Amino acid sequence: LLDGLPSGARFYRCAFQINPYDYIQRYNKTVEFRDEQSYNNAIVNACLESGIEIIAVTDHYRVKSGYSLVKKAREAGIFVFHGFEAVTKDGVHLLCLFDPSTEIQSLERILGDCGIHTDHEASPNGKYDVIEHLEEAQERHGAVCI
């Protein structure tokens, strides 16, 4: 019975801070991609070529901006955590990753709980300090923060 089971640890190559195309535009990053589709294709192809099996698409207190990249990566067989990058009121940056089945609408409500109600600022600070944010993320929202 146990002969068919793998022995030892299984390691995964991951990239947990992949920014969506909207982030690139917002911060005027110089890239060779003319549009979101070509950017998404390049990211997914680079992941596949590098053996990256798991990614997280994160943007500063935004979740909708990465949806097309999440979808494209999942279609390519990459396991994707959707989430966001939080900036606490004391200036600490955290990547907040959620169960992949979490709906975008639920993540938008979590952004509201963090004190983010618009996306007018490029990188706003949330209402929690780092300790409060970690506690809220884990206890109330089931997130993993790194």
Image (tube, grey):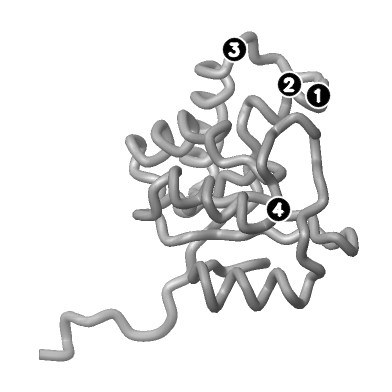
| Gap between marks 2 and 3 measured at Cα | 10 Å
38 above or below 84?
above
Q: Residue pushed farthest top?
A: 34
Which of the two labelled residues, at mark 4 and mark 3, occupies the earlier sequence position? 3
Which of the two labelled residues, at mark 3 and mark 1, occupies the earlier sequence position? 1
For the residue pair 90 and 21, the one nearer the viewer reads as 90
Does the CB distance between marks 2 and 1 fall below 8 Å? yes
| Gap between marks 4 and 3 measured at Cα | 31 Å
Q: Indicate which label's residue lies in the foreground, 2 or 1.
A: 2
Number of numbered discs? 4
- Identify the residue position indicated by label 1 in the image: 29
Residue at left offset 72%, top offset 26%: 24
Q: Which amino acid, mark 3? A: Asp
For the residue pair 2 and 101, the one nearer the viewer reads as 101
Q: Is residue 123 left or right of residue 8?
A: right
Q: Quadrant of the C terminus?
A: bottom right
93 above or below 9?
above
- Identify the residue position indicated by label 4 in the image: 115
Q: Badge 1: how crowded within 10 Å, few (<14), some, or many (20+)?
A: few
80 above or below 28?
below
- Identify the residue position indicated by label 3 in the image: 35
| Gap between marks 1 and 4 measured at Cα | 27 Å
Residue at left offset 64%, top offset 9%: 34
Percent from the top left, x then y, of residue 141?
A: 51, 67
| Gap between marks 4 and 2 measured at Cα | 24 Å
Q: Indicate which label's residue lies in the foreground, 1 or 4.
A: 4
- Identify the residue position indicated by label 2 in the image: 25
